[in-house]
Image (cartoon, rainbow, N blue to C red):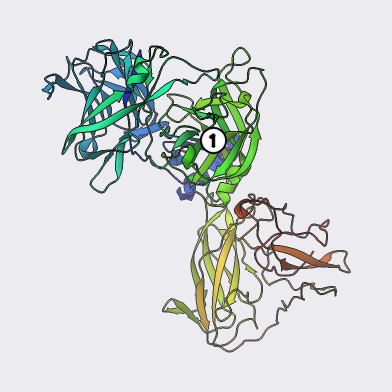
Amino acid sequence: MIATAAATVSTASAHATTRSADIAPGPISRAIATAKHTHKTVALPQATTADSTTVVNPTGTLTTTLTSGPTRLKRAGRWIALDPTLRRNADGAVTPRSAPESLSVSGGTGTLAQTPSSSGRSTAPLVTLGHGTQKVTIGWKGHLPSPELHGTRATYRSVGPGYDLRIEATRTGFEQFVDLNKRPGAGFSYTLPVDTGKLKASVSKGGQVQFADAAGRVKAALAAPRMWDTHTNKAGVHDHTAPVTVRATNSRPGHVDLVYTPDAAFLAAPSTRYPVTVDPSTQNLGNLVDTYAQQGESGDKSGETELDFGNPGTTNADGTARTARSLIAWNTKPFANAVVESAQLSLWNFHSAATDGHGHPWDVYATSSFDHTANWAKQPSWLQSFVTSYSTLGNPPYNDAGWIHADVTNLVSYWSGQQATTGYMGLRATDDNTMSWKRVNSSEAASNPPTLKVTWDFRPGNVHDLKVGPSATQTNGIWQVNSLTPTLQATIDDGDNDKVDGTFVIEDTASPGTTVGGPLVSSFAAAGTPVSVQVPANLLKDGHTYRFRASGYDGDLYQTDWSDWAQFHVTAAPTGGHAVDLTLPDSNAAASVNLKDQAPDNQSHPPYDPGISSLRKSAPQLAGPQQQPKCTPSSDGGKDCAWFEYPAKKTGATDPHLAKPQAAADWCSPNIPDNYTWPCATRRAPTHC
């Protein structure tokens, strides 16, 4: 059997995603209360998407389980499992049990109408994907018997002299093969008539066929085909392969004929072992993709049902190793800007080359962005390795296929700290040892796709509705206030509806970047209701224009950024009061500092700069300016501390955005050394410990 996979098709479907922080606080608060009361996990159905589910844990944290592709779809208002298993319907057509796109496979020409073709043979619809004006129908010239169904596969026997036709449904489309069971005659080729509806077909230089709408957006694609015989290497990979050319003929609006011609020399070679398979892999053209890049190959592998990484122990014609690396894009929107407590990557390892029965290392990287066109020559940037795993299965008799794992907490924390809604991950063997070669399921596999399980907690959410009082009015977007001790107000949301307070900072617009006084901290209030602070006397000057912003804290976690600025103009005379002296000594001064009792008014917790690092639970932070405290003993046995900016230390990292931070410390820890530093963006107010 030579299988010439004439076409693999997938549509550019984009499944819906939900950011958990976008869910109304009410359902989350009720779920948290129930989980804590019952000491059981509680499902959060409002957060379910095609590729994720979320539950609330008894501790009040949330756990989101992601897959690298869709595993469910919504029908009649409820989610059902995606199942590409083919079944025969009452009308004779064959369809998946459940699939995100409208896929229909011929039940045989006895059940479908036939139309004359230019060759004199009848043309029957073979498989249809999509609907309406964005539907693609691939036909077959000649007889189509009733197919044999087995799982996701439909096989049409003896559609031509010595060859069969095969359709395999995937999660996002299908693959189509012609299986040559014996050596064909000279000049063998076959034609697939394609009805494109309102879409326009084009064939790339590499043999990929794309179907685009009037705006040029690609809606479906047939991947460039290749073929191989039955020979496999010790890594279990078909290594005797050859190209298949494809050209478009008889093109007219709404139709094109695709002519596939397998390499004649490969078919005729005595070394070719029949049957041979030609496989154009289905590609997912949505925002999320998983694929692998292999040295010596340039084709798109995003539609294949497996991901490979490591050195298989074989070489290309030029002597280079056929090393592979895998790439997975994840929908990280549910926990963007959250505090990640744990994250585990799970891969279904159905084959490995570990013939010694031991685990062999592989690394998980953060990469730059990529899409389905990635290949060995077009890899993303491999930014940093976050973890090395030795988990290995899939090599009987030592072990069977199963799940292998890696702790990717730091990587997912990095994505969350970047507020990334898509996390780009790379997998590669730690070294070139062929024992590290692995093959795992991709998102296109009928079962067990790559999975990411993340436990996380909300940070305070959006800060909005910044206002100034009392009795202030706005002119051209600037609040006008007749007081030198105005009230500043903001509303702070919180995903799990905790009580929140706000930290406010003020700058004179004539001196941006210089804080007036110190941070002002409000009392706690219910999330979604205003919090406010009053500006102390003798800080503001009559006739000046100021700006302020705020950030939230829910008693456990800080926000990692500030609100937008709001401006206000002061026209009243000073009303008296005491001055808050925030003059700090030069960072190089040798004299001791005594700043006791000079913390800002209304300070209910230590001032905090949310732009960089939390002093409590915090995600790994990026490199930034450093601070060093100046502390002197006080009469009550504590310390008087002030904090000063220092230049960022050189970390030696190749990418400054991935530099590893120094550990954070509790504010005013009694054991804090005088030379302790950590990343910080701005000068902190002095405080007494």
- Regarding residue 156, the answer to whether it shows in the image is no
Q: Where is 156 relative to 349, above or below?
A: above
Amino acid type, callout 1: Leu
Residue sitting nearer the eye, 274 or 567: 274
- Regarding residue 546, the answer to whether it shows in the image is yes
Q: Is residue 539 left or right of residue 308?
A: right
Q: What secondary structure is marked by label 1?
A: strand
Q: In this view, does 88 lie to the left or right of 327?
A: left
Residue at horizontal 31%, vertical 38%? 204
Residue at horizontal 63%, vertical 33%? 430
Give the percent coordinates (x, y) of residue 530. Answer: 52, 64
Q: Where is 543 relative to 64, above or below?
A: below
Q: From the image, tell me which residue sits under label 1.
A: 452
Quadrant the C terminus occupies: bottom right
Residue at horizontal 49%, vertical 21%? 237
Residue at horizontal 33%, vertical 16%? 179
Which quadrant of the figure has residue 187? top left
Residue sitting nearer the eye, 171 or 529: 171
